Image (cartoon, grey):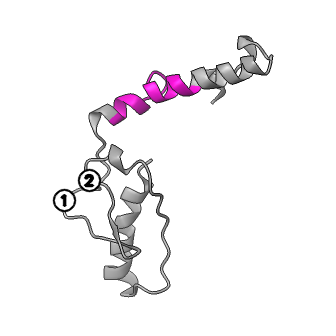
Amino acid sequence: MGLCEYVQHLSVIDYVCISAKMEGRVLEYVDHLHEKFRDPAVLRDGRYIAPTAPGYSITMHPESIAAHAFPHGSVWLKETAERRAAAEAKGMGASAAPKMRDW
């Protein structure tokens, strides 16, 4: 989570300091989870827009950190419950369901 927020800076560094080109450059962009960040990456016409706020653009909202904290965040608890229910539905029983330590 947050890779796009990091690589937007690499795009700027590549253009300003290394290649001075926009053609033939490829960076990953995944269009989800940006709402978890205070200053998410922005794309326009298929290109990263240079951030205007100082820093690395990876500061997450406190509620996002709490939800994704391992192993007690709500995201992990929901995932564990879903995996346990799937294992039980397959007749494997709760003891066969993946535990947090299995991740």
Q: Position of residue 99 (x, y in %)?
A: 64, 20
Q: Would you call the spot at circle 1 few (<14 residues within 10 Å), some (14-19), or many (20 or more)? A: few
**Would residue 94 be found to the left or right of residue 54 on screen?**
right
Residue 28 seen:
yes
* Element assignment for label 2: loop
* Inter-mark Cα distance, 2 to 1: 7 Å
Range of the magenta residues?
A: 64-79
* Element assignment for label 1: loop
> Along the line of sight, which residue is nearer the eye, 90 or 34?
90
The disc labelled 2 sits on which kind of residue?
Answer: Asp
Seen at 70% across and 24% down, the residue is 86
Query: Which one is in front in this view, the residue at disc 2 or the one at disc 1?
Result: 2
Q: Residue furthest left?
A: 53
Q: Position of residue 37 (x, y in %)?
A: 31, 47
Please identify the quadrant where the C terminus is shown: top right
Seen at 35% across and 81% down, the residue is 15
The disc labelled 1 sits on which kind of residue?
Answer: Ala
Q: Position of residue 8 (x, y in %)?
A: 36, 65
Seen at 50% across and 75% down, the residue is 26
Q: Which of pointers 2 and 1 lies earlier in the amino acid sequence?
A: 2
Residue 100 seen:
no
Indicate the quadrant where residue 20 lies: bottom left
Seen at 52% across and 25% down, the residue is 78
- Disc 1 designates what residue? 53
Indicate the quadrant where residue 42 lies: bottom left
**Would residue 79 be found to the left or right of residue 32 on screen?**
right
The kind of secondary structure the magenta stretch mainly shows is helix
Residues at badges 2 and 1 in contact (C-beta under 8 Å)?
yes
- Disc 2 designates what residue? 39
